[in-house]
Amino acid sequence: MDPDSVREGQRVPHGGEPDKEILDASANTNPFVPNGVEEVYADALEDSRRYPDDEYPEFRAAAAEYVGCESKNVVPTPGGLAAIRLAMETALEPGDRVLLPYPSFGEYAREVTLQGAVPVFAPHDAMLEATTNLLESCALAVVCTPNNPTGDAADPNALETFANRCGEAGTTLLVDEAFLGFTDFPSAVGQLQRSGQRWEHVVVARSLTKLFGLPGIRAGFAVASGEHAERLETARRAWSLGTPAARVGAYCLDQDAFVAETRERVERERERMRDALESRFDVFPSDAPYLLCDVGDEDVPSIIASARDRGVAVRDATTFRSLESHIRVAVKARRRNDRVLEALDVEPAEGVRW
């Protein structure tokens, strides 16, 4: 990390509502957790009197099975954002150029600048069309799938082609799959391995806590091979996951029925919410557990304040680059979603009860 850049840096806004009396539709987390998590956490808490096994064999094995790689390719991190920072710390030097999508997760640009590197922005829906010449001028390129805040996932075949182009250009590709678990799309790692493609230049960042409804646990991992894997493993902090996070994470990654049920609910509720929201806003197509809404000529702060007065927090999306009239709404459970719609003066659509 570059000290001069840190002195000039600043934090970026996020969703998340600390007031427990407010329904939080600003953070895109699962409102449910897998059955049995409490018992796993309690047992792990008792074992927390000792340092965790820094090799994390059970967590690595579960993560490897989940994304389709070998355990040696998994690097445990305290959340997906920690995996992103670790990837950038080990790949960038001051002055390097980094190709970033926009609008997208604000932490990418922040982390790039903290390393003393230079963000180069491209429209998120044109990222996979970046030319070899452009990639050759960049040390790193970032793809977010599904993209936050727009919600659209990258086509796996197009992403594979882009990954190959990055390899030819000598550019490291960082794929942020924080919300991919809510979809049926394969991890970039599994896709590349199944097709027999090289992926030594690819790093994947995964977050467990959004899909499994435990953002406060802070569990995630990076996936890499070859020299990148060695760098990540060397640079990661010792005991990078606490015992409860490692145990709960490994347990959750094995809950296939919970994941399938979540995906079905999110898809059904997302489409129902989109149908309702379109009566007032322009709503982006989404593969993710959130919907981006263009409010047009309406006033974003007024919409957010009005919803909050009714006990609901929605995300101010004007903090994302290029979005000037947008809010983002998380997809939760049926009754909570109806409360969100009502707080936005939108009539809830009918549908199967959850």
Image (cartoon, rainbow, N blue to C red):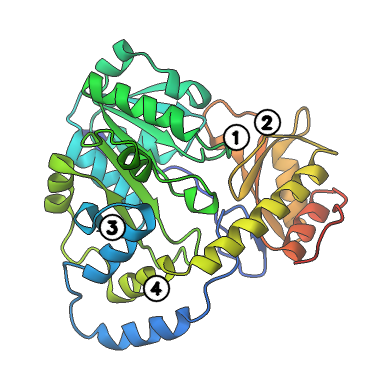
Q: Earlier in the sequence, mark 1 or mark 2?
A: 1
Query: Disc number at residue 318?
Result: 1
Taking the image as shown, residue 276 lies to the left or right of residue 103, namely: right
- Give the amino acid at mark 1: Thr
Instruction: Tell me the SS state at disc 1.
Output: helix
Q: CA distance from mark 3 to mark 2?
A: 35 Å
The answer to which of marks 3 and 4 sits earlier in the sequence is 3
* Crowding at mark 1 (Cα within 10 Å: few <14, some 14-19, many 20+): some
Quadrant (top left/top right/bottom left/bottom right) for the N terminus: top left
The residue depicted at 50 percent of the width and 45 percent of the height is: 185
Q: Where on the picture, by quarter, is residue 192?
A: top left
Mark nearest the camera among 3 and 4 is 4
> In the rendering, at what x and y percent does residue 52 appear?
20, 75
* Residue designated by label 3: 77
Disc 3 marks which amino acid?
Thr
Residue beneath disc 2: 325
Q: Residue at x 56, y 25 (%)?
A: 322
Residue 219 in view, yes or no: yes
Horizontal and vertical percent position of residue 51: 18, 77
Please tell me which residue is depicted at 85% across the width and 48% down the height of the picture: 346
Q: Quadrant of residue 140?
A: top left
